[in-house]
Amino acid sequence: MDFGFCLSPSSHVKMDSVDLTTFNRLKETNPDINTCIACGSCTATCTAGHFTEMSFRRILLMLQRGKEDEAKKMIQRCMLCGKCTLVCPRGINIRKILLDITR
Amino acid sequence: MNPQIFHPFVLPFVIGMAFVLTYCVVGLLRVIGQLPKDDRKKFWRSLVTPKTAWANVRDLFGDCLFHVKIWKRNPILGYMHTAIAFGWFMIIVIGHVMLFTLKPLEGIEAQGVERMLPNFYYPIFYKFFATETPVFAILMDFFLLMIISGILIAVVKKIHSKIVGVKRVTKFGFADNMIRFALWTIFPFRLIAEKTNIMAFWWIYSIDLCVFMFMLPFTRYMHIPTEALFILLRHAGLKPREPRKGYALAQLYSCPSCGLCIDACPMSVNDSNSGNTSAYFMKKLRNGDKEEAQRIAETCMQCGKCVAVCPVSIESCDIKMSQREAVPYQIHSDHSYLDGYTCTDTSNVSDKKACVLYFAGCMTQLTPKIMRAMKQIMEAAGEKYEFLDKDGGICCGRPMLLSGKRAEAQAMMAKNTELIKASGATKLVLSCPICYKVFKEEYHLEGVEILHHTQYIDALLKQGKLKVGKNDVNYVYHDPCELGRAFGVYDEPREVLENVGHLRKAKSEKELSICCGGSLGSFNLTQKERDEITENSVADLMFNQPDEIVTACPLCLKTFARKSPVAVKDLAEVVAGQLQ
Amino acid sequence: MKENILIIGGGAAGMEAAAQLQQMGMNPIIVEKSEALGGHVAQWDRLFPAFHPAKDVVDAMLDRVKDVKTYLNTEVTDIQRTGGGFHAVLSNGETLDAKAVVLATGFDVFKAERKQEYGYGIYNNVMTSVELEKFFRTGKDERINNPKRIGFVHCVGARDVKVCNTYCSKVCCATALKQACEIKEVFPEAEVYTFYMDLRMFGPGYEDLYLKTQKDFDVKCVRGRVCEVSEDMDGKLVIKAEDTLFGKPLRMTLDVLVLMCSMEKDKSIDAIQQKLGVGNNSDGFMQNKDMYLGMNDTAQDGVFVAGACTAPKSLPDTIGEARSVAVQVYNYINKV
């Protein structure tokens, strides 16, 4: 039935239908992943972040909010230089996680 | 059939020998066939080039027969290997010389030999190839005893490896254990056969040899024939391209699984990690266990110590890198955003060629003390300099290479090359050995001298451009893997330190130095595992109670700072503090 | 005869425990390694959350221990358990016997040089929270020269695996906001930024302090950890952090950067602690029996702990523990 109008798609994150497969896979090999306190050190220090919007903190969130495509796009900017891993106050093995996502 | 010419007991041996030879020839053709065309060309050429040909001869004798490299590491093990390899070789050679030059006496029974020998000497190993010349009998005896003494050491090593100075040995499976037993018993059986002259023992001896020959291709003992080929390929200057093909394949089969790399590997500080060492990597890869090989390859820190201690000079780090490169990725990097990027501005420098271009690198951005020290040093020396990455530059590409993504790394390297060339500078100074390695090995920067700051500071001091005072501090120097083992930059930093203070020795120095544990080479090590490595390395450096630990790598610096009981400094920082 | 109680440390915990023990009829003896009683709090200008002058509190505490036997500039060099208590040797050569020992050795301030990327000891205008407090007390610090923009970095040496301190240092959030207000009082024109990860304003009056920073002092709070500091041509500090709420990395020029250094256990007591058989917990502080009813007890009978030697603590926490340790000691002596 066409009422001549429609509900605009909600911009909400649909937590009920988020696919966490990738995140859970990462969590298996990198249990530290949950210790992130979202301090943003990784993003602030990021060599690629100097030129682009690369942010590991956001990639982690994207994977947990059903935005896997965005995360995979963002990760292409990464130079794998390892600065993020060096500054992370939680000792998260970020380089390994980044590499695992691209597999 | 005339037993003097032929006796059926030799059949098992002959069949075994024929099998091994066929296998080796097929293997040889396969390896050479798998070499990329340009590598193959290089190989043929190296065989006829006098310099490499001489190196081939030297190493074929030095490594395959005398095991010079094992002697250097551990004389007992050196003797063990030489005794068995050289002893066996000599018995074969002398046996053949005797066969061709002398008329064998009456078959197995050799009467009258005793008469020809001095009264005090009774040959124990003579009956089959009985000889008219006592010299041969004495030689044969000598080498037989040598072999048996070597086997005795091997037995002791197997029972209690610590007696011969080896903490950990490679753990073997059934086949490897069985062929080892076959090898150990060959000569005792031969001796018994010679002494008793009972036909059954000659048969046992021959069958034992046959078992050894048939198992050889499927066990670590394949290293005996393969090492010869590997030496030739190595001298041709090849690099492994694919983990299980061509040159790499020759290396895989040349690894004797001796396990010297197990004790050497920094990861072995935690026993549960000793399975991640090169000996096991080579074994897994040889056996086609790709998953495990991949996991070990990615756990390795690429510190290169296993290569440094390897008696066969297996380039396990390179093979691990080729293993990393073999992994397919779904997502590829896209660094096209770098296209329009320019950073350095040397336009205000009148003589660009005299300008020193300083590239701090990502890691050094996190150690501002090194950057400040370099600035002070360059200013004190009156150098014209420019920072390539003052405001954050592009990664050198080595971390990406370490992940096996060569093409992606090349995009970054190309951009850096462009920036450096555009600057017009003729000298590039780096503070980070990680960068240094990739700049030296992968970049094509003709006309640009690439120096690590340790070399640069050393040169400035020697040229008299830099004046420093000497203090009373006792320093110990840690060799960063990518500067020391990779390029042998051992003396420059030490000479600099002796100019500014006193140098104390670490327990393990230079090519034996222990990785700090911070390495970007490893992807799998956890923080805890890294900490254990760091603590072990710090303890090694603290061996002679230095006042300060000095290193020349920002990553080593940060890693050690977490665990060191004394101050940790970069060489540049120490020098800057002593400027006059 | 009154029982001797050896109190190691003459800071807030040691002084308050001594005052209470004396009132309870015991003979406390304070051994303090520095030249004066008062500990860290004596170096403070005002206290959060209500800007109460630290001097008032310290003076009151000092007054209460004026009759307590006190050794200054003295350390315990050796201690042994004897039949009925402990036998201690002091660095001045004296010895003393005590029925019980109270460890009130407090904390050490995290050495900011250890976070090299923050540039303390490298760039002139990077200072610690302790140094800023000294500026408030004395009005003098050559780094503070009518600054236009000041930044505070939270969690320096806390919640940070890279310096081996994974714990939260508890008091830095409130201290940072207190100091942010104070610097605004001195330089009303200045812009003040704090870089935090979580503002842990849990105590009474703390939230009011936070509201004050927002309503009265316009302190700008940015949620993100500063990760790199460098210096520009003019000697100003350039910091890098991510504004995690906005989702973008930011750069900012500052005149002064204040590092909110965490508390670490004072390791100068390690040897004595080992002799007494008191271990450390996973944060490197002293291990008490448990954090509830046994918070003042250790694994060793007759050895008690109070204050920041067991964990980072605020002044009220410390005073509370000092009083409770007095009761515990009293019960131990009288075998209640």
Image (cartoon, coloured by chain):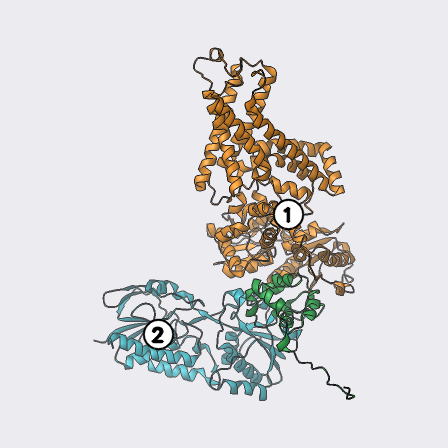
Chain colours: A green, B orange, C cyan
- In percent of width and height, residue C334 lies at 24, 76
Circle count: 2
C7 or B115: nearer the viewer = B115
Tell me the quarter of the picture where residue A41 sits. bottom right
> What percent of the width, then of the height, locates residue B440?
69, 50
The answer to whether B174 is drawn above or below residue A5 in the figure is above
Tag 1: amino acid: Ile
Tell me if label 1 and label 2 are in contact, CB under 8 Å. no
Q: Residue at x 58, y 19 (%)?
A: B6
Q: Which mark is residue B319?
A: 1
- Where is residue B185? Give x, y as percent: 49, 31
Query: Residue placed farthest to the left in the image?
Result: C1
Q: Amino acid at mark 2?
A: Gly
Q: Is residue C4 left or right of residue C152?
A: left
Q: Which mark is residue B429?
A: none
For mark 2, what is the residue? C294
Q: Quadrant of the N terminus of chain B?
A: top right
Q: What residue is at 46 percent from the left and 39 percent from the top?
A: B158
Quick check: can you spot residue A76?
Answer: yes
- The relative height of residue B57 versus residue C192 in the rendered view (above or below) is above
Where's residue C272, x and y in %?
Answer: 35, 64
Q: Residues within 10 Å of mark 1 (few under 14, many from 20)?
A: many
